[in-house]
Image (cartoon, grey):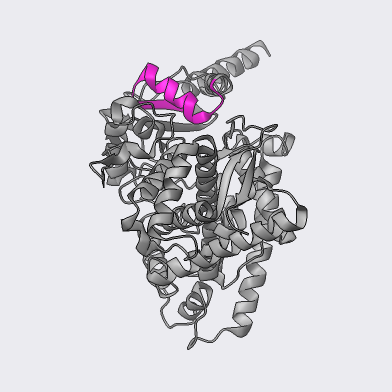
C-alpha cells in the first residue's frame, strides 16, 4: 500500500513538473504552475488594470515584446509593439487559425466559417465570398448607397423617437447595432431589421453578453474544460450555447426560405449564390450548407459588433470634444450642406472628417487583441521558439497607443494629429485592421460605415453629455472593446 501511494505521488509530481515546464527558448513570461499555468498572474494583472489588453501590455513591458503565457492547458503567445507585430502578421508559418474544441463547438463541431479557418479551405471560401459579395455591392458604389440608406433610416428613427418620447436622451452603446447589421445582412440574406425589432434586439443583447464573457483568447471553460460541467454559467459555457442555438435558428429559417424560393437565374443575395454553387457539378470540397450557415454566423457577429462598437467610441469622444465635433460639422456644411445626404464621393473632399474616422478607429483598434493565429509548424518569432499549434495573438495597443510610435498624448482624441499641411499622413504603426494575409476582409466596408454614419449623424444632430449622467469611460473587457452603458443628448439640428 505504501509503495502504491508513493508511486502515485511520484507520478503526480512528474506530471505536475512536466505541465509547468516551458519549451526550450519559449518566449519569456510569468511562471507556469501545474494545471493553471500563469492564469493567476494574468487574472491579477487583469483585475488591477481593468482589461486584458492592459494586463498583457504591462507584462510585455516587463518580459519583452513576445510574451509567453499558459492558460490552463493552452499555451499562448502575445505579441506587443510594432516590430514584433509586423513580423508576426507577416509570417506564413504563423498564419493558421486555432482548431480546438472551443472554436469548433460554434460551427457544428467542425472547422467551418470564414474567420477561424485557414489554408486551402480559407482561401477557397474567402475568394468565393469576396467575389460574390461584390455582385451585391461590397466595395462598390452600390455599397455606399446601402449604407447611406441605413444612415438615413437611423436619422428618421431618432427624430421620430424624440418626438414620440419627448426626450433627446439615448443609450448610445446600442444605437448602431441594428443599422450596422443591416448594411451587411442585406447582402448576405436580403434582410433588414427595424431598430425596434424585439427579436433582433434580444439576439443582439445575448451576443453582447457573450462578447463580454469571453475574449479573443477563449473562455474559462475552454481553458479549464471541467468548468462547463461544474460551473457552466460562470465559465461562459451556457451563454455560448444559448447564443449559437438562437443564431442558427434565425439563420436556418432564412436558409429554408431561400431554398424554397431559390432561382439560380435571379440571385438576390449571397445565400442564393451559395445555394447555386452547392447544386453545381463540382462545388468544391469546402462547400456545404453547414459552411454557408457558419459564414452567415461569422458575418453577423463580427461584421456588426466591431463596427457598431467603433461608432460608439466615435460618438463618445465627439461628445467629450465639442471642438472636434464643431470642426467636423463646419466641414460637412461647407462641402455637403445641410440637405444633401453624404456619400463616399465626399470623402476625398473632407480631410478633417476622414481624420475623425481614423482617430475613431484608433481609439477602438488600439484596445484590440487580434483574432488568434496558430503556428502551422515549429517556427521562430523574434528569436524565440514557437511550437506547432501554439496560439499567437497581437495586442495592437503597442502599435497605436504609444507616444514613441507616432501618437503623442495617445489617450486624447485628436483628429488633427494626421493632418500635415492639409494632407493626411498616417504613421506606419497605424493598423486598426491588422495587416498581412489575414488583414480584416471587411476593412473597406467598416471604414465606409464609420465615415457615412458619423458624417450623417453630425450633419443632423448635436451630441453632448447628459449633465446628470456623464460617461465613466469604462469599457467591456471581452471579445472586442466596447463602452459600458452611457447616455448622450442627441439634439436635432433641424426637425
Residue that protrudes farthest toward the top in the picture: 2
* Prevailing secondary structure class for the magenta stretch in the rendered image: helix
Residue occupying the point 39% across, 51% down: 331
Residue occupying the point 64% across, 65% down: 193
* Viewer can see residue 192: yes
**Span of residues in magenta:** 49-69
Q: Which x, y percent locates residue 402?
A: 36, 27
Depth check, front residue: 81 or 119: 81
**Quarter of image, res 157:** bottom right
Above-or-below relation of 453 to 254: above
Above-or-below relation of 485 to 95: above
Residue occupying the point 38% across, 40% down: 415
Depth check, front residue: 39 or 19: 39
* Viewer can see residue 285: no
Depth check, front residue: 39 or 216: 216
Quadrant of the rendering where the C terminus is positioned: bottom right
Q: Is residue 348 magenta?
A: no
Q: Which x, y percent locates residue 198?
A: 74, 59
Q: Which x, y percent locates residue 449?
A: 47, 57
Total numbered labels placed on residues in the image: 0
Quadrant of the rendering where the N terminus is positioned: top right
Q: Which x, y percent locates residue 295?
A: 51, 62
Residue that protrudes farthest toward the left in the picture: 421
Amino acid at each position: 500500500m505504501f509503495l502504491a501511494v508513493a508511486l502515485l505521488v511520484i507520478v503526480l509530481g512528474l506530471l505536475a513538473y512536466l505541465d509547468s515546464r516551458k519549451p526550450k527558448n519559449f518566449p519569456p513570461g510569468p511562471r507556469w504552475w501545474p494545471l493553471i499555468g500563469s492564469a493567476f498572474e494574468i487574472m491579477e494583472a487583469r483585475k488591477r488594470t481593468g482589461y486584458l489588453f492592459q494586463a498583457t501590455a504591462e507584462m510585455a513591458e516587463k518580459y519583452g515584446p513576445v510574451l509567453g503565457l499558459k492558460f490552463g492547458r493552452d499555451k499562448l503567445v502575445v505579441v506587443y509593439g510594432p516590430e514584433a507585430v509586423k513580423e508576426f502578421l507577416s509570417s506564413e508559418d504563423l498564419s493558421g487559425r486555432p482548431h480546438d474544441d472551443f472554436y469548433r463547438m460554434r460551427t457544428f463541431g467542425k472547422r467551418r466559417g470564414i474567420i477561424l479557418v485557414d489554408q486551402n479551405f480559407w482561401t477557397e471560401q474567402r475568394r468565393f465570398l469576396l467575389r460574390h459579395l461584390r455582385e451585391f455591392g461590397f466595395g462598390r458604389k452600390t455599397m455606399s448607397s446601402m449604407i447611406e440608406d441605413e444612415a438615413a433610416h437611423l436619422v428618421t428613427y431618432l427624430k421620430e423617437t424624440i418626438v414620440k418620447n419627448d426626450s433627446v436622451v439615448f443609450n448610445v452603446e446600442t444605437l448602431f447595432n441594428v443599422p450596422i447589421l443591416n448594411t451587411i445582412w442585406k447582402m448576405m440574406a436580403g434582410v433588414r431589421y427595424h431598430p425596434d425589432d424585439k427579436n433582433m434586439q434580444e439576439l443582439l443583447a445575448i451576443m453582447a453578453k457573450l462578447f463580454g464573457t469571453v475574449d479573443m483568447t477563449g473562455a474559462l471553460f475552454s481553458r479549464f474544460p471541467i468548468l462547463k460541467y461544474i460551473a457552466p454559467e460562470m465559465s461562459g459555457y451556457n451563454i455560448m450555447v444559448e447564443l449559437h442555438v438562437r443564431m442558427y435558428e434565425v439563420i436556418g429559417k432564412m436558409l429554408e426560405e431561400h431554398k424554397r424560393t431559390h432561382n439560380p437565374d435571379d440571385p438576390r443575395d449571397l445565400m442564393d449564390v451559395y445555394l447555386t454553387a452547392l447544386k453545381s457539378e463540382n462545388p468544391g470540397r469546402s462547400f456545404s450548407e453547414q459552411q454557408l450557415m457558419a459564414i452567415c454566423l461569422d458575418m453577423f457577429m463580427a461584421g456588426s459588433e466591431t463596427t457598431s462598437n467603433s461608432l460608439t467610441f466615435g460618438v463618445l469622444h465627439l461628445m467629450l470634444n465639442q471642438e472636434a465635433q464643431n470642426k467636423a460639422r463646419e466641414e460637412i456644411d461647407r462641402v455637403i450642406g445641410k440637405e444633401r445626404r453624404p456619400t463616399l464621393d465626399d470623402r476625398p473632399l473632407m480631410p478633417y472628417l476622414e481624420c475623425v474616422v481614423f482617430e475613431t478607429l484608433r481609439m477602438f483598434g488600439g484596445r484590440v487583441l487580434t483574432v488568434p493565429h496558430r503556428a502551422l509548424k515549429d517556427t521562430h518569432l523574434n528569436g524565440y521558439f514557437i511550437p506547432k499549434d501554439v496560439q499567437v495573438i497581437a495586442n495592437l495597443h503597442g502599435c497605436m497607443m504609444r507616444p514613441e510610435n507616432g501618437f503623442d498624448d495617445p489617450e486624447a482624441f485628436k483628429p488633427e494629429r494626421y493632418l500635415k499641411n492639409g494632407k493626411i499622413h498616417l504613421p506606419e504603426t497605424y493598423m486598426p485592421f491588422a495587416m498581412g494575409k489575414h488583414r480584416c476582409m471587411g476593412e473597406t466596408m467598416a471604414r465606409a460605415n464609420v465615415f457615412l454614419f458619423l458624417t450623417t449623424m453630425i450633419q443632423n444632430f448635436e451630441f453632448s453629455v447628459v449633465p446628470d449622467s456623464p460617461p465613466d469611460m469604462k469599457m467591456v473587457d471581452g471579445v472586442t472593446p466596447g463602452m459600458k452603458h452611457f447616455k448622450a443628448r442627441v439634439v436635432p439640428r433641424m426637425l
